[in-house]
Image (cartoon, rainbow, N blue to C red):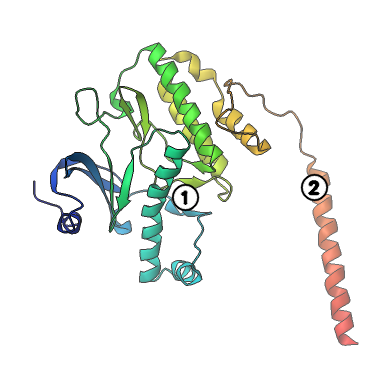
Amino acid sequence: MKIPKRIQPLVDDGIVDDVLRQLMSGKEATVYVVQCGDQVRCAKVYKEASKRSFKNAVLYNEGRKVRNGRNARAMQKGSKFGREQQEEIWQNTEVDTLYKFAAAGVRVPTPYGCFGGVLIMDLITDEEGYAAPRLNDVSLSEQQALSHHQKMMDYVVRMLSVGIIHGDLSEFNVLVDEQGPVIIDLPQAVDAAGNNNAKKMLLRDVNNMTQYYAQFAPSLASTRYGEEIWAIFETGELSDKTVLTGQFVDSEVVADVDNVLSEINAAREEELDRLARIENHDLL
């Protein structure tokens, strides 16, 4: 096929030898099957922000650190340079997260680098060597669904143990090969400690997966893995050795709203008194 414009520089530099076919086109990227030497791999070509349909990107960017002060200011102003830096962070997040997840024992495609907005990584295949199907295209037995769901919960724990939440986990972002599920699509990965929406996103990720597998294994519908995982995470005791039960009991402790408001008002009055003392001192 004709070599896409964005991949041509990689062909010129010898990183890619040929483009075999388009594999899929999604909300943030188009993926091609490419020849790299004697290896067949994937080339994920990220779409420009103006053409990307990924919603609420600002929610996912919260908590991502920008070390360079100039870059951070440019991003806040929304200048052309700032937008370019934001795009670079969006793309590099996936590469960095792939390496972190692989090191944590999560099954993801092996990355080989991101070049000018094109991520080169392993092509996940089925037993016959064809591109592996997405989870939503696979029919499972009850036992397979229970086994795969257990693996996915283990992966969620391992991801969170290194401080990261997928943020968009569903049956459309999981491939299935002969060994089971493989997690893909990570540019929106969330910093669990730095994002105020972290808990909400984790629960959504877990619920998406549980609801899907529950089609084949109805017993999963009554589990509460998301709440259990987050509760353990908040105690600081979550690790890849954590054993889950799928059970969670809501706290029956009722918040003392009046006491909280009283403390807020007391702190406010104390601050007003402090400011008044400073003002009186300045008038003397």
The picture quadrant where one finds residue 142 is top left
Q: Would you say 30 lies left or right of 175 here?
A: left
- Measure the alpha-carbon separation of dots 1 and 2: 31 Å
Q: Which residue is mark 2?
A: 260
The picture quadrant where one finds residue 211 is top left
- Can you say whether 233 is above or below 218 in the image? below
Image coords of residue 128 (percent x, y) = 19, 23
Q: Give 90 or 53, whichever is nearer the viewer.
A: 90
Q: Amino acid at mark 1?
A: Tyr
Residue at (55, 26) in percent of width and height: 225
Q: Does residue 221 appear in this view?
A: yes
Residue at (45, 69) in percent of width and height: 71
> Is disc 2 surrounded by few (<14), some (14 to 19) or many (20+) residues within 10 Å?
few
Q: Residue furthest right?
A: 284
Q: Earlier in the sequence, mark 1 or mark 2?
A: 1
Residue at (40, 68) in percent of width and height: 82
- Can you say whether 130 is above or below 98 in the image? above
Image coords of residue 18 (percent x, y) = 13, 47
Image coords of residue 175 (percent x, y) = 32, 30
The residue tagged with tag 1: helix, strand or loop?
Answer: helix
Where does the C terminus fall, quadrant-wise? bottom right
- Can you say whether 154 is above or below 283 in the image? above
- Can you say whether 244 is above or below 21 in the image? above
The residue tagged with tag 2: helix, strand or loop?
Answer: helix
Q: Which residue is mark 1?
A: 60
Q: Amino acid at mark 2?
A: Val
Of circles 1 and 2, the one toward us is 1
Image coords of residue 209 (percent x, y) = 44, 28
